[in-house]
Image (cartoon, rainbow, N blue to C red):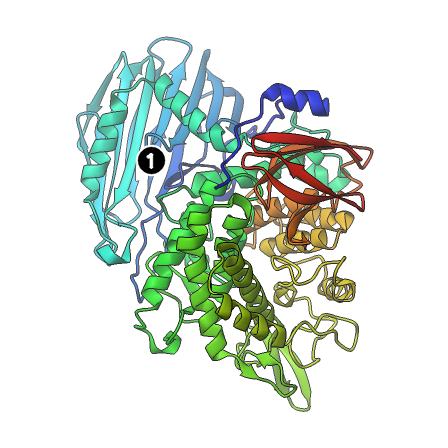
Amino acid sequence: MIRILPLLAVSWLTAISGHAAETPLRLWYEKPAGPWTEALPIGNGRLGAMIFGLPDKEHIQFNEQTLWTGDEIQMGAYQPFGDLYLDFPITGVTAYRRELDLNEAIHRTSFTANGVNYLREAFSSHPDQLIVIRLTADKPGAITGTLRLTDAHNAPISASGNTLTSKGSLSNKLDYQASVKVLNEKGRVTSDGKSLKIEQADRVTLLLAASTSFFNSPEKNWRGEAPDKSVSRVLEAASGKSYDVLRTSHVADHQALFKRVNLNLGPSHDNLPTNQRIVLNQKDKSDPGLSALFYQYGRYLLIASSRPGGLPANLQGIWNQDMKPAWYSGYTTNINIEMNYWLAEPTNLSECHQPMFDWLRNLATVRKKNTQPAIATDKGWIAYSTNNPMGGNSTWGIHRPGSAWMTQHLWTHYEFTGDRDFLKNRAYPALKELVEYWESYLVEGPDGKLITPAGWSPEHGPVRKGDKIVLQEGDRTPQPGASYDQQIIWDLFTNYLEASEALGIDEAYRSKVATLRSKLLGPKIGRWGQLQEWMQDVDDPNDHHRHCSHLFALHPGRQINPVSTPELAKAAKISLNARGDGGTGWSKAWKINFWARLADGDHAHRILQGLLAPIGGAHEAGGVYPNLFDGHPPFQIDGNFGATAGVTEMLLQSHVKKESLYLLDLLPALPAAWPNGSITGLRARGGFEVDLVWRAGKLSKAVLRSTDGGKCFVRITGSVRPVQIAPNSSQTLQP
């Protein structure tokens, strides 16, 4: 198994790049948040909060990732948990600032009022499994206020001693509890049964714990320990630690993941509030540092919403304020859940990938019970398009190749880590059972090619109206041989073949699958030079649909690339140009990845800048909110994650093989807008870690490392060379 490499010393970045070792990574503002999409997110993978930063009436809206309605059949929806309000008799505020420090994963609000300087810090600790809020002032006895807790489902609130508690149960019998404990230094805390009053304290630490009775296993019927036990245990443990100890362990835990990658793209207008940077950058494109901030924000959000042992990041990560969130805030399998994890392996966050694997295994377990006849199968499993943590689903549409697409992530994890136990026990069985399903489901088409008999190209399709074929939004009429299906099945078969060969097993079946793959209907070029979306040549050059599903073979697949399949790559480019650069947030994020794979960094950068535009006014779709959340609209986190993945593809690609070895393509799509820069700590397939430095648009130095050692090919400005690295060694490359 290839292990995660240790953190680079800070001095290394300085030595190779000449840039400052620490790039400021913070979102900051001169005013408190108004709407929810101006508040700033913290999270520990399970417990998240949006902080508004109001001096006199602080508002902290919080979520716990398992608070779901629904079950194995009904979809339900992800639920808000509650709100914590801190009311203070504060007036005359000056020198106000609120910020989210990505390097430390700490939210800060600072201001001056009546001659007192106040500082509030908040973070969601993964080691201690709770939210910590610290209130300080530079004069003694200056903290006086009232704490109120509300429950999103109107459960009763009780206050006793120094603790506030909400406790309730959802319609699906899921129990939940949240408790806030006040630890004051000097002063006193009193209770009126519904709230807590703090009087003349010097410093105050608030501990917010929340939990449910959810247990992440269908074998346990999704239920486990009562939440009051886990909440009490967490609060008791944290209460015995000082704030400094809680803070130090939180920062160390976060930085062990976050600081593996450092990106510098050039000048940064960090002296301006983030909302102003977004607007200014649209005018003069003079802030490449904003792109770097957006990139690292994606990594921050994944760390904060997806940790081992928990659920995967949903459509909004873990942050949601609505009882009926858009698209249930669920797991949609025709792009969204997959896009959420494109960044995990290449940006050195492999651990954060684990929740998706566990959810995928649980979903397969539930689906193979065949409780819903419409998606029952004799071999393997399929699912509906949108699902919850327990396997329940929306019945909007069956997404037959979704299980194959998601299983690509298992193979990808092996490609990056070399974990043979994972390949043998998790990835290979999952790949094989889906290959067996598609072997039984494919049919022979008119020209003898194997096709899917009832395919789909999300989320529209050709319908006949009179004597014309038109493309209709949301149409799910079955279409044999749809390119999207065909390309995903090619990818599944290819991943299976390589997995079987890597393990040295099932040689006879491997040969059979290779034959099946050779008979698949492949990508076709249509009448106007486009990559056809359907088996019939009915594509409309004026179709600007948000989905580009027929380009799966370009990304995240590997069936099409400019070097080995130039004609198909040209057709993909024609299709992309016809679709246009607009679209929803996640659609633009996918297009960044497409253009990066086509080695057109300037086009990828142009779309990235469009994604970084402010939502609202003339820009109603596919931009960002003031807190840099991606807008569909509304907020969908896949655009954040997909954009980070896209920038990574611009700087490093490793999906192509040469002579059975991975080909690491260095700076394959570097835009002119980033002439000088550096990145350290990226991961490549084959278990390599890569640092890059470039000057005047050209690579000046690359460093490759490997713990287990290995061979690969490296492409630098069109020139390909073999590289061999000994175990626990590195190699420096220059053009």
Residue for point 40% across, 67% down:
394
Q: Could you say which is closer to the camera, residue 313 or residue 89?
A: 313
Q: Is residue 341 above or below residue 440?
A: above
Pinpoint residue 425: horizontal percent, then vertical percent. 39, 54
Q: Is residue 639 left or right of residue 672?
A: left
Q: Is residue 723 visible to the viewer in this orientation of the structure?
A: yes
- Residue, disc 1: 84
Kindly identify the residue that appears in the image at 19 percent across and 39 percent down: 228
Label tally: 1
Q: Position of residue 696 (x, y in %)?
A: 82, 33
Q: Residue at x 40, y 69 (%)?
A: 381
Label 1: few (<14), some (14–19) or many (≥20) C-alpha neighbours in 10 Å: many
For the residue labelled by badge 1, is the local secondary structure a helix, a strand or a loop? strand
Instruction: Please name whichever residue, 277 or 419, is drawn nearer the observer in this view of the structure.
Output: 419
Nearest to the observer: residue 382 or residue 733: 733
Question: In the rendered image of this protein, does residue 259 appear above or below residue 643?
Answer: above
Say whether residue 543 is left or right of residue 505. right
Q: Provide residue 678's location: percent of width, then percent of height.
A: 70, 31
Q: Of all residues shown, which one is farthest toward the bottom?
A: 467
Q: Is residue 75 visible?
A: no
